[in-house]
Amino acid sequence: MRGEFFYPTVLAIIGGSTTIRFSVNEEDSFIRQLSGKIDRIGLKDTTMSVLGLSATSPASIAIPDCDFEKIIEFLMDWIAKHPCSPSIRAIGH
C-alpha cells in the first residue's frame, strides 16, 4: 500500500443538511486513519477540514460554493486521489 495505510479500511460518510462528516477506519481494529468534514454546504465559505493520522491539526480546504451533489463529487474525487484510497474495502453511512 502507499503511504501509511497498510490495513484494509472502511470509509464512513454521514451527511446532514449543511455538513458531511467522513472517516477512514481500519477494518478490524476501527482505528481512525483519516477524518474530516465539509461545512456550510450550499452557503458561502464552504470548507473541508481533514485530519490524518500523523497530523496534529486539521488541514482546511476552501471549496467553491456549490450544491450538495457537486460537493459529493468533490469529496469522492478527493478521496480517490488520497493515499488511503487503495486500502478502502467498504463504504458505509
Image (cartoon, rainbow, N blue to C red):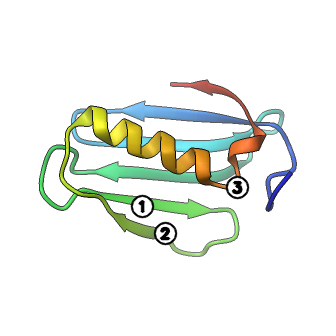
* Residue indicated by mark 1: 49
Circle 1: element type = strand
Dot in front, 1 or 3: 3
Q: Is residue 82 above or below residue 11?
A: below
Residues under labels 3 and 2: Cα distance?
17 Å
Name the outermost residue toward the bottom. Answer: 56
Circle 3: element type = loop
Residue type at mark 1: give it.
Ser
* Residue indicated by mark 2: 58
Residues under labels 1 and 3: Cα distance?
17 Å
The mark nearer the N terminus, 1 or 3, is 1
* Residue indicated by mark 3: 83
Give the x, y percent position of residue 23: 57, 44
Which residue is found at the position 49% from the left and 33% from the top? 13
Give the x, y percent position of residue 35: 55, 52
Which residue is found at the position 48% from the left and 53% from the top? 36
Residues under labels 2 and 1: Cα distance?
6 Å
The mark nearer the N terminus, 2 or 1, is 1
71 to the left or right of 84: left
Q: For this rendering, which residue is in front, 93 or 79?
A: 79
Residue type at mark 2: give it.
Pro
